Image (cartoon, grey):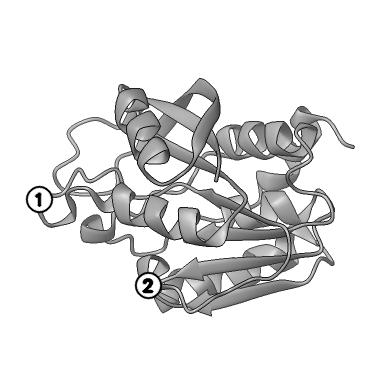
Amino acid sequence: MGTKRALEQQLAVVAGFERPKASLEQYRTPPDLAAHLIHIADLQGDVEDRLVVDLGTGTGMLALAAALRGPTRVVGVDVDPKPLQTARENRRRVGTRTDIEWVNADATQLPLCPDEPTTVVMNPPFGAQDDNVHADRAFLETAAALADVSYSVHNAGSQQFIESFAEDHGGEVTHAFQAAFEVPKQFDFHTEASRTLDTEVFRIEW
């Protein structure tokens, strides 16, 4: 098992969105956050020799992080085909030989029924845009249907909602930790060069 620092360094080459869409809340997951999430998942035995599904993979940051830690295979799902092209290029940059399938589909209506131990990782939309309110709820519903365990990034202050949702769907939050999420200026409504958001990551056993 490699170190978290080594994983972060490997992910530094992962390119972000060329033309991000505000409506889909397309932000590149920071390499340090991705490395932290996947390192913890690996320590919990939730990556190696398992199927890992990255919902809303974007340009593939979490999927590629998982691919570097010995899963049987990885599936990265995104509704927007353009970032998936970048994800394929990012795979070549990272150099992993793990079997990765990039699927252009709505992560909240996923035609996937795995019959093997499955871990979902995801940085879902936070619902910051008016037409995207509660978007993370739909992603969690997919995780509950697909996975034995999931890791997901949410706005700070989400713990009560996440715990309630998990309980209502037969799951249990086993780990929660805070993480900084740096967002660069990429849309007209951004007024700062960059902004650091307080986020929380949750591990849920379903």
Three-letter code, disc 2 = Gln
Depth check: give the residue in front, 94 or 76: 76
Residue that carries the numbered disc 2 in the rendered image: 109
| Disc 1 + disc 2, Cβ < 8 Å | no
* Mark 1 vs 2, N-terminal side: 2
Tell me which residue sits at (37%, 72%) in the image: 109
Three-letter code, disc 1 = Asp
Q: Residue 137: percent from the left, percent from the top?
A: 30, 49
Q: Secondary structure at mark 1?
A: helix
Depth check: give the residue in front, 179 or 136: 136
Q: Quadrant of the N terminus?
A: top right
The label number, if any, that marks residue 41 in the structure image: none
Question: Which is more foreground, mark 1 or mark 2?
Answer: 2
Q: Name the residue furthest left.
A: 130
| Depicted 139 relative to depicted 115: above or below | above
Tell me which residue sits at (73%, 65%) in the image: 116
Residue that carries the numbered disc 1 in the rendered image: 130
Q: Name the residue furthest right.
A: 1
| Depicted 40 relative to depicted 70: above or below | above
Q: Residue 157: percent from the left, percent from the top?
A: 30, 22
Q: Residue 90: percent from the left, percent from the top?
A: 64, 63
| Depicted 154 relative to depicted 63: above or below | above
Q: Residue 47: percent from the left, percent from the top?
A: 75, 48
Q: Secondary structure at mark 2?
A: helix
Tell me which residue sits at (36%, 65%) in the image: 108
Residue 104 located left or right of residue 203:
left
Q: Residues within 10 Å of mark 1 (few under 14, many from 20)?
A: few
Tell me which residue sits at (33%, 32%) in the image: 164
Q: CA distance from mark 1 to mark 2?
A: 21 Å
Depth check: give the residue in front, 173 or 55: 173
